[in-house]
Amino acid sequence: MARNDGIDRTSVRNLAVSDKAVGNTQQHNEREKDSYRNPDIIPQRAAWNVHFKKPTASYTDLFAQLEADGTISTRGLKPDATHYCELVFDVNSAYFDNHGGYEFAKQFYEDKKKKSNKSGYPDEAIKTLARCFYPSMVEFFNSEEGQREYEEWLKEQEALQALPVAA
């Protein structure tokens, strides 16, 4: 996210997406729309988007395939349960431009993807645990207590950002 103040930033957004809105989310993320209100979106640069896992079909088709393959299960979910969440990293492209451009960015994220699991446990075990814990985590985050703790965490982050940085 560029603010033209010389500071490189990355923001991360995790957002629940309703079943009705997932098609619009896909069109936006995959740059399938004809026009955008956000002036920072340059459709001609869509090929520069970096995916941790590039979609090979529509988001809803991929979800249905995961369910059909038994990779995920919606058994026991409430009728209004959230099926889709979006995790987007919005990166200040100046950082990557200053370090080698698109190829640097692509390699940066590939390296991060490879190094994400350093636990010694197999990726599949981590994914299985994540599938088990995720619904409880979302429920907690959406609760009053979860929102209160999140607000406290945000205040702590603001306080940390306000601390002077040693040169």
Image (spheres, grey):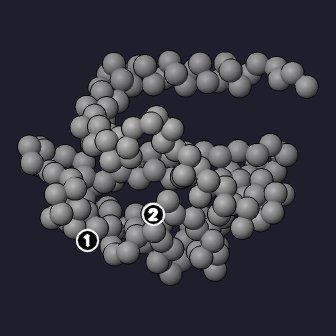
157 displayed left or right of 153: right
Residue 163, above or below 84: above
Query: Residue at coordinates 62% horizontally, 68% vertically from top-left?
Result: 41
Disc ID at residue 61: 1
Label 2 Cα neighbours within 10 Å, binned few <14 / some 14-19 / many ≥20: few
Residue 91 at x, y percent in the picture: 65, 53
Residue 87, above or below 24: above
Q: Find disc 2 in the rendering and name its residue.
A: 53
Q: Are marks 1 and 2 in contact (CB under 8 Å)?
A: no
Q: Quadrant of residue 141?
A: top left
Query: Residue at coordinates 67% horizontally, 18% vertically from top-left?
Result: 159
Q: CA distance from mark 1 to mark 2?
A: 15 Å
Query: Residue at coordinates 58% horizontally, 74% vertically from top-left?
Result: 46
Local secondary structure at mark 2: loop
Residue 151 at x, y percent in the picture: 48, 23
Out of 138 and 56, give the one closest to the viewer: 56
Label 1 Cα neighbours within 10 Å, binned few <14 / some 14-19 / many ≥20: few
Residue 152 seen in the current view: yes
Residue 153 at x, y percent in the picture: 52, 21
Query: Residue at coordinates 38% horizontally, 43% vertically from top-left?
Result: 122
Out of 69 and 123, give the one closest to the viewer: 123
Quick one: which residue is furthest to the right in this view? 167
Q: Quadrant of residue 158?
A: top right
Residue 41, above or below 33: above
Q: In the rendered picture of this protein, how many numbered marks are placed on residues? A: 2
Quick one: which residue is furthest to the left in this view? 76
Closer mark to the observer between disc 1 and disc 2: 2
Local secondary structure at mark 1: helix
Looking at the image, is mark 1 or mark 2 earlier in the sequence?
2
Residue 149, above or below 27: above
Which residue type carries mark 2? Lys
